[in-house]
Amino acid sequence: MWVFIATEVLLFGGLILAYFVYRHAFPQGFAEGSRHTEIVIGTANTAVLLTSSFLVAWAVEIFSPATTRIVTWLLVGAACLGLVFIALKGIEYSREYDEHLVPGIDFQFAGPLANGVQLFFIFYFIATAIHALHMLIGICLLVTLATICRRAPTTRHHTALHSAALYWHFVDVVWIFLFALIYLPGRSS
Amino acid sequence: MSETNYLTTDYTLRSWFLTTDHKRIAILYFASLIFFFFIGGAAATAMRIELATPQADLVSSDAYNRLFTMHGIIMVWFFLIPSIPNTLGNFIVPLMIGARDLAFPRLNLMSWYIFMLGGSTTLFAIFAGGIDTGWTFYTPFSTLYSNSYVIVAAAGVFIAGFSSILTGLNFIVTIHRLRAPGLTWYRLPLFLWSLYATSVILVLATPVLAITLLLMATERFFGVGIFDPRIGGDPLLFQHLFWFYSHPAVYIMILPGMGVINELVSCFSRKQVFGYKFVAWCSLAIAAVGFLVWGHHMFVSGQSLVASLVFSFMSFIVAVPSAIKVFNWTATLHKGSIHFDAPMLYALAFIGLFTIGGLTGLFLACLAFDVHATDTYFVVAHFHYIMVGGMVTAYFGGLHYWWPKITGRLYSEYWARTAAVLIFFGFNLTFFPQFILGAEGMPRRYHVYPPEFQVWNVLSSGGAAILAVAYLMPLFYLGYSAFFGKRAPANPWDAPGLEWQTSSPPPEFNFTTQPLVTRAPYQYNEAFEAKPQNA
């Protein structure tokens, strides 16, 4: 599983590298774009995701044949929080659509910073969409494991749970990076 | 041989297409790769026919663009990258380490299906009208101007990338976890070291290609300007990201070939590989340094001179471990008891051709010369010497070497040697003239050229005809031997490797008893004379 995580790091790494190249080229445009993001939703989502990761970590910690009930509920809870995240993300997307901030579909932004802002939003949408896709896969994993835990958990499933938890934490960590890159530039000044 | 083996356990189609046996999956890959090899080869043949005369007589310039793109995409992603790892590697790795199967057998099957899905998507793009960007998908041509099936082809490559990643992951975990008792790292055959290095590159480089192609396709589909300079994008960034994958990918293609050559040279000299630890660590060194040289594809792209100097220097550095390997192979031959069986002919051809390819690579790493040779046939000849002269030759060598193990049959030694010699001559006749053409300034990717270049082009096309025949020959004599050849003994080469200690073909779970390893690899018995009989 660690090997797989390495692959994922490079996938997001390439994207974040491209982000930095352009942020370096268009510092004001990126700052301006960042000021147009929904920081309230972004922060709420960070909290949701961290809580969800906490539940998963808890489930891994107490996993044993005697605790299957509570492990199941912890996993279901984590998956539900994942869905909350996706839902909030959807609201955020629709607001940005209303503000004409979706490049390629409906993008209107006047002023000298338009190029930078557009590039910023391209990266915003690509990065968050790939992240959301990873979230969906993670939710499916958690639900599958919760079902297994309910029926017939064995020690063999501990490895599976470990791997799924690792993946979920990874998705969480990626979000922490994206949060800093997307919502924070341009807000300190 | 009355006991059942992996080929005779079951004959249904279902048992093949839903198998989790690494040996059967290797055969599935093998069949698919033959198919892709001949498609890519057909495109090359069409190009060489066109280039026999200076005028355009067979295809238009637009069709020619589509031909070389198709040749590149198919050969790189659907033949070279999966060739040795997914066929020979899949078959041999568990046998070599004394395991029942790879670590994740179902993942292995899944990666074949993903590969076929990617392959079909790309084939669809090709037959629906083709792609004219070249295999590198350079922006802004690919995103703004090209009027062809770029997104579909990129999607095919993107999907196939997942198959590469899963295979690499599977090999890494297998080599870490499933080695037989006593099989320490320094007792591993060198083929495994090189496959391990390859897998590391597959896992770390392929995702960067994925994100690059994704960005490119997004730009093309939505019309947004990620790499479009008019709205602030930077086309050079695409090249940086692309070559960050594609230069390591060159080592994905050559490292497994080097691994095979270790086995062949050692077996047919009846000696240990000279400097085992050096060769082993050189594989990893190539993998590591290979990540730091991508900029030598971009010397004329307008990147900074400092960057070019650093990349030029690193490119010289990466040649060192490759050169160590070549010296160690020749040192292995020294005072060996050399047998010129067909696999050895391929191995010797590899050493010669790879050396030429590698040395001309050093020419190109020199900034001043590269400016002169960029986008000429010199570059084309250079990488074909590595990819075709190196990798494809090693693939054929390995295929002949392990053929008795895979099929349980012996091929005709006479025809195999003839094909090996023909491939060597055909190859040199095809590609050596291209060095001269390139040095004289003939640019690549044009279907017409000034008449003074015709002599060399005719030689090259003639060589290509020989090469085409030589590549078709194994299809017949190996195909014949698979059904009608003489039965092979378990260990026709009298080799000590674990894969030869089980029957040919191996039983479904490889070994009847768990093998135990007590000594270093390549402990050959010098008195070997029992050559396999002609079929």
Image (spheres, coloured by chain):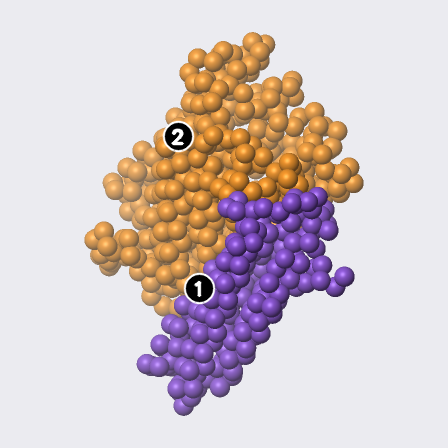
Chain colours: A purple, B orange
Give the x, y percent position of residue B288: 64, 52
Query: Could you say which quadrant of the image residue B363 lies in?
Result: top right
Instruction: Determine the secondary structure under disc 2.
Output: loop
**Crowding at label 1, few (<14), some or many (≥20) Cα neighbours within 10 Å?**
few
Give the x, y percent position of residue B445: 54, 24
Q: Chain of mark 1?
A: A
Q: Residue at x 52, y 47 (%)?
A: A106
Residue type at the position of mark 1? Ile
Q: Residue at x 41, y 63 (%)?
A: B104
Q: Quadrant of the C terminus of chain A?
A: bottom right
The answer to whether residue B528 is visible is no
Give the x, y percent position of residue B248: 59, 46
The answer to which of B187 and A33 lies nearer the viewer is A33
Residue type at the position of mark 2? Gly
Give the x, y percent position of residue B329: 59, 44
| Residue picked out by circle 2 | B129
Picture disc at residue B416: none
Left or right, A137 with reference to B23: right
| Residue picked out by circle 1 | A137
Left or right, A150 with reference to A84: left
**Crowding at label 2, few (<14), some or many (≥20) Cα neighbours within 10 Å?**
few
Question: In the orientation shown, which residue stands out farthest toward the top?
Answer: B451
Compared with B64, B78 (above or below) is below
Question: In the orientation shown, which residue stands out farthest toward the right?
Answer: B306
Left or right, B264 with reference to A27: left
Q: Residue at x 39, y 73 (%)?
A: A143
Instruction: Determine the secondary structure under disc 1.
Output: helix
